[in-house]
Amino acid sequence: MAYTLGIPMDIDKGLYSRKQQILIAGAKLFHKNGFKGTTLQSIAQEIGIEGPSLYNHIKSKNEILSTLLLTNAQEFSDRMQEIKSSSEKALQKLERLISLHIELTLKNPDAMALMLNEWVHLEKADRTKYVKLRDEYDNDFQSILVNSIDEGDLVETEINLMRFMILSSLRSLYAWTAKYHSFNRIELEVSVKSLILNGILKNKNL
Amino acid sequence: MAYTLGIPMDIDKGLYSRKQQILIAGAKLFHKNGFKGTTLQSIAQEIGIEGPSLYNHIKSKNEILSTLLLTNAQEFSDRMQEIKSSSEKALQKLERLISLHIELTLKNPDAMALMLNEWVHLEKADRTKYVKLRDEYDNDFQSILVNSIDEGDLVETEINLMRFMILSSLRSLYAWTAKYHSFNRIELEVSVKSLILNGILKNKNL
DNA sequence: ATGCAAAACTAATAGTCATTAGTTTTTAGG
DNA sequence: CCTAAAAACTAATGACTATTAGTTTTGCAT
């Protein structure tokens, strides 16, 4: 069974389930207008039904946001575990993490946009869960950077700043892909890795 | 006369004017809860008055956001003009731009956060103005990168991606400074410039 | 002191939604 | 076909909140 956004897709008909349509429309509109700036009526309209009809498929407006954010945060977390536990050099793990961000960004740009800001509108329990997943991810990311420094591959800069700048770039990529969809994934990976690893200077002063 | 957020400060008393207090509180709460997630009552409470009393100082809730965003966008624009018209090498201009972002981020982290997302809640005329300032800034930024490539100082990557990744990092710095305020401006400038210019690899393959 | 303008307060108003209730239509299996 | 469940619709409800109206308080200039 194929999954997207944590919801099964009805393969036989090649169609998205109603619930999935709601999640896709919700992600699009939350991204465009913000969670609080989006009405259920507008989400319903996007998929051709009336506002209250949504309640045949969802429990609340908040559930839409929560599903989008937690599903994706969980996927980042799961993939991080997989990468962490591999036996590669830390530098290779870092490259795989960059690829991961690009992969998920291309698959789901709207949800990536939400992950930056709209989590503040989650209800307490969900927000706690989300922030925990994110903090753990960031910690794991940083550990990999530290290992790579110890292995002699990365420069010794203030480690929090290094992590912060890398993740900021990667987490903003959704805005890039929205404008320049001509790029294919491989090209993008090569360019992004080079910019992060080598910087932009042509002649390094060694 | 000293200005902050475009509003004069009453130097004699060493106090912020009521309007300035409102802007500062608004920036803080818009950052924390989003524009739509912030009530006028909560802004008023932050400075110790009742919600409707705000209207002795402002025209509308939207005016608060608009002032914050346009004042800061204008400052970026003005400072860009100054840097553009200097006679330095493009690479030096780029370094000055990095310093500019750091300076304004440290001065006004909440407003920087708003500039990323909350502009979608501006009313049409203001939104148009804001987006124009921002697009012009981005274009100018990119021109400087192009010049620097032409001058042989920067690598030839996809130029839009290069600009995009640099600006993403710089525009997210507000989140860094909120957590690690121990860093002083100079240290931060040195580290950020090095990460952008040289990347994170220790041994470059030339 | 005193009076006026600025600034604050309390009490309405009015619009906007999320959500619920109650009903009708659609759909799929027998 | 027929029927029961799923899914849609229309019409409330009830909270919330920006903004306005009208009144009182504050603080400064004379």
Image (cartoon, coloured by chain):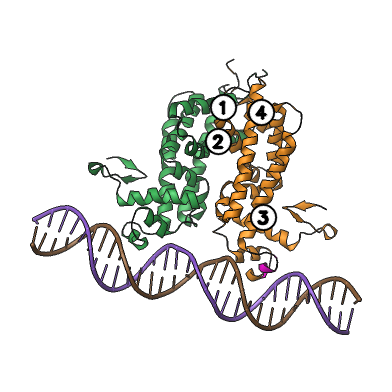
Chain colours: A green, B orange, C purple, D brown
- Residue that carries the numbered disc 1 in the rendered image: A195
| Amino acid type, mark 1 | Leu
Cα separation between marks 1 and 3: 35 Å
On the rendered image, what quadrant is the C terminus of chain B found in?
top right
Image-based side of D9 in relation to A169, left or right: left
**Image coordinates for residue B106, horizontal then vertical, percent:** 70, 44
Do the residues marked 1 and 2 share a common chain?
Answer: yes
Chain under numbered label 1: A
Query: Which residue of the protein is positioned furthest toward the top in this rendering?
Result: B206
Image-based side of A1 in relation to A32, left or right: left
Q: Which numbered disc covers residue A169? A: 2
Which region of the structure is painted magenta?
Answer: B53-57
Helix, strand or loop under label 1: helix
**Image coordinates for residue B25, horizontal then vertical, percent:** 66, 58
- Residue that carries the numbered disc 4 in the rendered image: B194
- Residue that carries the numbered disc 3 in the rendered image: B67
Q: Are marks 1 and 3 in contact (CB under 8 Å)?
A: no
For label 2, the crowd category at 10 Å Cα-Cα, with few meaning under 14, some 14 to 19 and many 20 or more, is: many
Question: Residue at coordinates 80% horizontally, 52% vertically from top-left?
Answer: B2
Q: Are marks 1 and 2 in contact (CB under 8 Å)?
A: yes
Helix, strand or loop under label 4: helix
1 or 2: tag closer to the N-terminus? 2
**Image coordinates for residue A130, horizontal then vertical, percent:** 47, 48
Question: Residue at coordinates 63% horizontally, 62% vertically from top-left?
Answer: B43
Chain under numbered label 4: B
